[in-house]
Amino acid sequence: MASSVARQELDHAVEQHKRLIPIVCRETESELTPVALRRLHWIFFRDVDDFDQALATLVAATPPASILRVARSVVTPACASSGN
């Protein structure tokens, strides 16, 4: 990982036994990928991949409570900034 902050976040997530769902948006050097991510099943969202299939895979792999939590974190700031 190029970002030390991202690496710290990954290390913290692993230590806390958080569920990780790696999403690939572009190719990267495999030796730069942390071991904690190498062993997982990746979901490919690259330009050459089927977006609808990747999204369906992501939704299927994500517990409903997590989807709701993410939706709230995206909607709430947007509503706050628009005055709603």
Image (cartoon, rainbow, N blue to C red):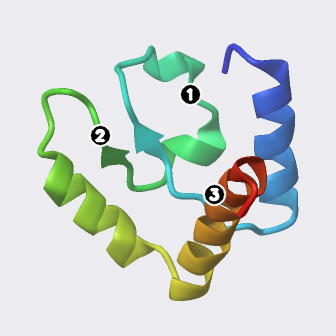
Of labels 2 and 1, the one closer to you: 2
Residue 40 percent location from the top left of the image: 47, 54
Separation of disc 2 and disc 3 at Cα? 20 Å
Looking at the image, which residue is at 36% across and 63% down? 58
Q: Earlier in the sequence, mark 2 or mark 1?
A: 1
Front residue of 15 and 24: 24
Residue 13 is left or right of residue 46, and the answer is right
Inspect the image, locate mark 3, and give the three-letter code of the amino acid beneath it.
Val
**Quadrant of the rendering where the C terminus is positioned:** bottom right
Inspect the image, locate mark 2, and give the three-letter code of the amino acid beneath it.
Phe
Residue 7 is left or right of residue 21, and the answer is right
Q: Vertical placement of 38 versus 56: above or below?
A: above
Q: Vertical placement of 79 versus 10: above or below?
A: below
Q: Earlier in the sequence, mark 1 or mark 3?
A: 1
Q: Secondary structure at mark 3?
A: helix
Q: Secondary structure at mark 2?
A: loop
Residue to which mark 2 is pinned:
45
Looking at the image, which residue is at 16% across and 58% down? 53
Residue to which mark 3 is pinned:
74
Inspect the image, locate mark 1, and give the three-letter code of the amino acid beneath it.
Thr
| Marking on residue 33 | 1
Q: Vertical placement of 14 versus 1: above or below?
A: below
Q: Earlier in the sequence, mark 2 or mark 3?
A: 2
Residue 61 is left or right of residue 84, and the answer is left
